[in-house]
Image (tube, rainbow, N blue to C red):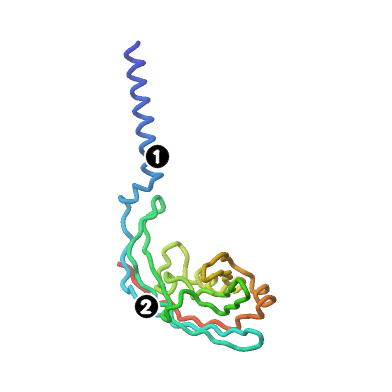
Amino acid sequence: MKKTITALSIICILVIVIIALLYLFVLSGAFSILMSKPPEPQITYGEFPFSITYEVNGEIRVYEDSLICEYAGIESRGAAGKYRIWTSKLKSGNVNICLLKVADSELTYEISTSAGLPEYYMGDFQYGQDRYDYESVMHDERYLGYRELKNDEVINSYSIEKEKVFEKFKLRIIERKYSQPIENKFE
């Protein structure tokens, strides 16, 4: 009887250890090394011109630039799997699309917007979305970026409703023209 209880105890301890190890293996994402890599894109670089026409205090302005998109490889995201990574930057060298910069005695305020996601332009709809899902997000003009800076350091950054931007800064976007995404193949 004692041997049976000892054997059962050992089996229970082994099962608990195995379950704990499996749980840690899954939780840590270590099992993602066993997952297959997503296919590589056929096209890995693209430049996408865009323009934004907007008004500030009755003055019409146009911001023109190009978004440069590049394939940056595969990234493992633990339990979420492996994904293609894309980077983007503005051809002008600007960090963001700043439509307006206003300085007062202590702070500088910036109103900015986005050129869109590099995945969209490079035809990589890997997250279960399609082109139209991305476009609905890109053309959602309800919000703009708002940053407060002190001595060129960002002290506050968040989204601001376009109505508040117009009230406070008399800025409104009239038209956005974006390039179309490419048709990419993944092998």
Q: Earlier in the sequence, mark 2 or mark 1?
A: 1
Q: Is residue 180 above or below residue 19?
A: below
Residue sitting at the far right: 167
Q: Which mark is residue 172?
A: none
Q: Position of residue 90 (x, y in %)?
A: 43, 77
Name the element at disc 2.
strand
Which numbered disc covers residue 46? Answer: 2
Q: Nearer the viewer, residue 148 or 92?
A: 148
Q: Amino acid at mark 1?
A: Tyr
Q: Which mark is residue 23?
A: 1
Kind of residue at disc 2? Gly
**Residue 26 figure quarter:** top left
Does residue 38 appear to the left or right of 131 in the view shown?
left
The residue nearer to you, when weighing 97 against 182, is 97
Q: Looking at the image, which is closer to me, 88 or 1? A: 88
Q: Residue at x 32, y 19 (%)?
A: 7
Question: In the picture, which quadrant includes the N terminus?
Answer: top left
Up/down of 178 relative to 107, above or below: below
Position in image of residue 144 (x %, y %): 58, 72
Q: Residues within 10 Å of mark 2 (few under 14, many from 20)?
A: some
State the residue at coordinates (63%, 74%): 105
